[in-house]
Amino acid sequence: MISVADTGEGMEEATRQRLFEPFFTTREIGRGTGLGLATVYSIVKQSEGYIWSENGPLGGSVFRVCFPHVSALSMTEEADSSAQFSEQAVHAETADDMHPRGTRRGLAAGI
């Protein structure tokens, strides 16, 4: 399971119920399309995984993602066919930037 948490105010239940809907956003017009979490939801579901959100124990929100177990053999076979792509992706995924709300955002190079 992968968990991602923030230290914001959390979300009302009505907002959490709509989080993964395409074009749903709580931001003002012109500040996002509302497609980010809908895209994440689609990728997780296509991978036969699960994603959900809950309010954190001390405020903020927690997103949890579970993917199905993959055997080491199938991972090795897939890695052999895409080794060049994976090496390039690692370099692109290590860059960090600042999110507009002041939180640090970056992608992990490996899990």
Image: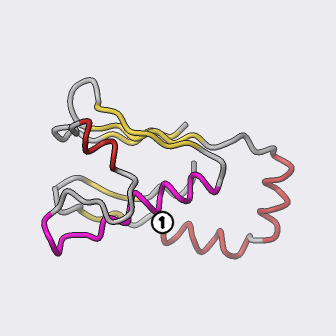
- Quick check: 77 above or below 71? below
Give the magenta part as a residue range: 28-46
Res 59 → quadrant = top left
Q: How is the image coloured?
A: secondary structure
- Counting from the top left corner in percent of width and height, residue 53 is at 38, 39
* Image side of residue 83 versus residue 89, left or right: right
The residue positioned farthest toward the top in the image shown: 57
Res 23 → quadrant = bottom left
Taking the magenta stretch, the answer to whether it contains residue 35 is: yes
* Image quadrant in which the N terminus is located: top right
- Counting from the top left corner in percent of width and height, residue 96 is at 34, 63
Please state which of residues 41 and 58 is positioned toward the viewer in this rendering: 41
* Image side of residue 3 versus residue 58, left or right: right
Instruction: Count neighbours of disc 1 (C-alpha within 10 A) and say few if under 14, some if 14 to 19, many if 20 or more.
Output: few
Res 14 → quadrant = top left
Q: How many marks?
A: 1
Residue visible at 78% across and 54% down?
75
Residue visible at 15% across and 71% down?
29
What kind of element bears circle 1?
helix
Please state which of residues 53 and 5 is positioned toward the viewer in this rendering: 53
- Quick check: 2 above or below 42? above
* Image side of residue 111 versus residue 23, left or right: right
* Image side of residue 102 versus residue 21, left or right: left
- Counting from the top left corner in percent of width and height, residue 54 is at 34, 33
- Counting from the top left corner in percent of width and height, residue 3 is at 44, 38
Please state which of residues 96 and 58 is positioned toward the viewer in this rendering: 58
Taking the magenta stretch, the answer to whether it contains residue 102 is: no
Residue visible at 72% across and 40% down?
69
What is the three-letter code of the residue carrying label 1?
Glu
Residue visible at 22% across and 25% down?
58
- Quick check: 24 above or below 81? above
Circle 1 sits on which residue?
A: 93
